[in-house]
Image (spheres, grey):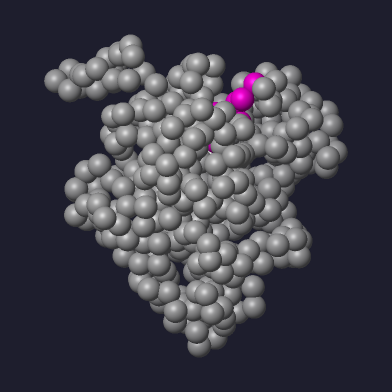
Amino acid sequence: MATVLEPSAPESEVRPVDPLDVSRSVIWEEDRWQEPFRQLRAEDPIHYTPESKFGAYWSVSTYQPIQHIEGNPEIFSSSWELGGITVAGDGIEHLEEGVMAMPMFIAMDAPQHTAQRKTVAPAFGPTDVLRMRDETVQRTGDVLDSLPIGQAFDWVDKVSMELTTQMLATVFDFPWEERRNLTRWSDVLGDVEMFGDREKRDFRLKTAFEMGAAFKELWERKAKNPGEHDLISIMLKSDAMSHMSEGEFMGNLILLIVGGNDTTRNSMSAYAYGLQQFPDQRTRLENDHSHELAVNAMHEILRWQTPLAHMRRTATQDTELFGKQIKKRDKLALWYVSGNRDESVFPNADQIIVDRENARRHLSFGYGIHRCAGARVAELQLTTLIAEMQKRRLRVHVKEEPVRVPGCFVHGYKKMMVELERY
């Protein structure tokens, strides 16, 4: 295996690295993950990395094996006890100091996963999403109407964060004036890079307890005066989630906050950034305001961006996977971000094509029993943003390269300076 020197490491820490270790934060921060994944897909779609910051793991980089693994949860476990859903986890037997077990239903296997998912999923069903539609349109319009025309501002802060945080506050019935805490907690608790440093682990745990205390207060208020549609009230009324342990309570909150925040927030940022990279496709959306094209473009942007770069599974037994021998307890990273660029499924996959025929086949929400429960809400938010921008004939110009999230789990943007103009 060829090695390279990590270019952005301090000189005293320069060391040989595996160029196909795609968990390295620097390739995400510098937006140069595309080439190593292109090489993996072409040469070794199920690739073993014996050493990394997160230990040994398999990279699964093409569409079909990812679907196969997701479709066999009894062999490829999501359980938090075995390591959970990111490459950072090493299981309950290897918890480091400063780490607390925080089970969440996406990191559980049946039957516990099934019961808790059934509790939460109805809050994001077709009827509830339809109920949210008018309010989503109103909030999106209000945010867009507050933006300056011809003046630079941070799209991530003013649009992506604001709209997703407003939706989260609504879904949880969280105190409106404190809604930006949801973004702050999400940024810390979704950062897998924090697991590698004791001081950062302590900070992450402190943040988790801060979040837990705020939601415990909300839980107690809802226990006395439950609502009809908010998630806390729904949990309280269920047998599966009404008596969760402290760790499980915080784990499920992390799941719902990070899932609700990062998927939508980074897709909204990709709408601005990605369409500037493909101005002919932006023109298509500017000239065709049909609902059908907006919906298809939404799926295509989700595919192109892939807001969560990977999910992890752990083998529960020795097994063969497309010719590779997987051992029990092996860690497998399912790189959705690469499966969504698989040219055998998505021709010209590096391009945004707003009328792509199979854009809906993207893996950005996962596949199988762990497919994102809130997918319809994310789709509603992004489609609404596209439609409301069209209605106002607004075009985004990105003024400089965005600041990206330095990590291999959340694939997103921290800051993006833009200007708006009318067309």
On the question of residue 414 being in view, the answer is: no
- Is 229 within the magenta? no
Q: Can residue 362 be seen by looking at this rendering?
A: yes
Q: Seen in the image, is 358 located left or right of residue 178?
A: right
Quadrant where the C terminus sits is top right
Magenta extent: 335-343
| Place of residue 363 in the rendered image (x, y in percent of width and height, measured from the top left) | 61, 39
Q: Is residue 337 magenta?
A: yes
The quarter holding residue 395 reads top right
Residue 167 position in % (x across, y down): 59, 58
Q: Is residue 232 left or right of residue 405?
A: right
**At 76% from the left edge and 65% from the top edge, which residue is drawn?**
127
**Going by the image, does 127 lie left or right of 145?**
right
Residue at image location 66% in from the left, 37% down from the top: 362
**Residue at point 35%, 28% (across, down):** 49
User: Looking at the picture, how far across and down is residue 47, in whole percent?
Assistant: 43, 26
Q: Foreground: 185 or 139?
A: 185
User: Splitting the image into 4 quarters, where does residue 355 fall?
Assistant: top right
**Which residue shows up at 61% across the image and 31% down it?**
63
Residue 15 vs residue 283, the one in the foreground: 15
